[in-house]
């Protein structure tokens, strides 16, 4: 089979979607299929990671034109970003493009509902962390005297929760018995007082750094498919997650606690601290990995061969 993928792998620290692209290309080739990044008449399946124009200026309208010319070609759209972080044009484009796809893969039911998709030609495949995050797991059932919290983000969008992280940093200065580390890029509105800042890291570095902590905190909102919390779960950490996080509650409800304000976040930190063995064992039970998830993508591609 010849599969066109509209994104190419990028080396270095990057968002979670790039890891999926890299693994999908590798898995298809390993199974004996051909992967291309230029449309041609003999392409069997178009796998769309993003309907917007790519680096070559090719976007979803080009896929429709190609399918009109070569009707045996199938379009599979893997929905990632639904524009929920202040990108209404992207929301409109995704909402329209999924209606014309032969099959749609959503990373969460929240993402499907966010764009009001009601057809039956879809499945939900939750995102997952790379296997290497499981390899460095923190198996300690007793936390440090001073709790170590951590979070990490690639995006600098304000919806990532910088307001809450700044409040926690200030609380750390004011005698809260917590150490808080932030890895990644951040908004220029971000007040980092009291926070241990670390530059963006590649996956293998994150898999080593995250397990050195006790609890993973996220304050991100409206996430269609939140990869950062999954990397923390793979690392064996309980999750503190904010109400309104979109996919995050689907991913983390069994492995941590939800909060809806800074005060309730502090209460949740205290709750996990006092019941640490319980929440750590919950986190240990998480066993999904991205490699297996990508094989599910391949199964869908093969099932949609004309």
Image (cartoon, rainbow, N blue to C red):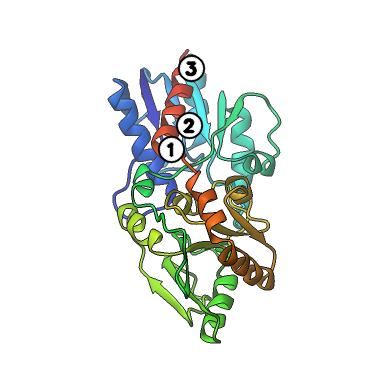
Q: Could you tell me which residue is drawn at 39 percent across and 45 percent down? A: 18
The residues tagged by marks 3 and 1 sit, at their Cα atoms, a distance apart of 25 Å
Between circles 3 and 2, the one closer to the viewer is 3
Measured from the top left, where is residue 79 in percent x and y?
54, 39
Residue beneath label 1, please? 58
Name the residue at the bottom extreme. 174
Residue that mark 3 sits on: 303
Quarter of the view holding residue 218: bottom right
Q: Earlier in the sequence, mark 3 or mark 2?
A: 2
* Residues packed near mark 3 inside 10 Å, few (<14), some (14 to 19) or many (20 plus): few
- Foreground residue among 231 and 48: 231
Say if residue 36 shows up in the picture: no
Please state which of residues 197 and 265 is positioned toward the viewer in this rendering. 265
Q: Secondary structure at mark 3?
A: helix
Question: Is disc 1 in contact with disc 2, using a CB cutoff of under 8 Å?
Answer: yes
Mark seen at residue 62 = 2
Are the two marked residues, 3 and 2, in contact with CB atoms closer than 8 angstroms? no
Q: In the image, is residue 173 above or below residue 157?
A: below
Q: Nearer the viewer, mark 3 or mark 1?
A: 3
Q: Where residue 137 sits: x, y (%)?
A: 38, 52
**Residue sitting at 64 percent across and 44 percent down?**
92
122 is higher (above) or lower (below) than 220: above
Question: What crowding class fits label 2: few (fewer than 14 Cα within 10 Å), some (14-19), or many (20 or more)?
Answer: some
């Amino acid at each position: 089979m010849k599969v066109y993928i509209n994104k190419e792998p990028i080396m270095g620290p990057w968002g979670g979607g790039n890891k999926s692209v890299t693994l999908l290309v590798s898995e298809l080739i390993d199974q004996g299929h051909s992967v291309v990044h230029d449309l041609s008449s003999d392409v069997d399946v178009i796998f769309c990671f993003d309907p917007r124009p790519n680096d070559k200026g090719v976007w979803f309208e080009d896929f429709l034109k190609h399918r009109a010319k070569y009707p045996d070609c199938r379009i599979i759209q893997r929905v990632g970003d639904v524009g929920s972080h202040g990108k209404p044009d992207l929301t409109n484009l995704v909402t329209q493009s999924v209606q014309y796809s032969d099959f749609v893969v959503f990373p969460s039911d929240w993402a499907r509902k966010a764009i009001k998709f009601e057809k039956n030609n879809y499945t939900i495949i939750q995102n997952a962390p790379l296997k290497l995050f499981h390899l460095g797991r923190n198996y300690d059932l007793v936390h440090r005297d001073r709790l170590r919290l951590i979070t990490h983000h690639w995006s600098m969008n304000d919806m990532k929760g910088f307001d809450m992280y700044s409040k926690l940093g200030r609380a750390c200065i004011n005698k809260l018995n917590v150490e808080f580390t932030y890895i990644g890029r951040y908004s220029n509105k971000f007040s980092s007082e009291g926070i241990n800042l670390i530059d963006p890291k590649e996956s293998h570095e994150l898999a080593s750094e995250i397990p050195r902590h006790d609890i993973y905190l996220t304050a991100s909102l409206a996430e269609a498919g939140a990869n950062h919390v999954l990397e923390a779960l793979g690392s064996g950490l309980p999750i503190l997650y904010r109400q309104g996080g979109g996919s995050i509650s689907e991913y983390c409800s069994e492995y941590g606690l939800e909060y809806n304000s800074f005060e309730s976040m502090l209460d949740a930190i205290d709750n996990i601290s006092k019941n640490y063995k319980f929440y750590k064992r919950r986190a240990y039970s998480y066993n999904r990995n991205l490699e297996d998830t990508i094989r599910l993508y391949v199964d869908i591609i093969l099932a949609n061969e004309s």
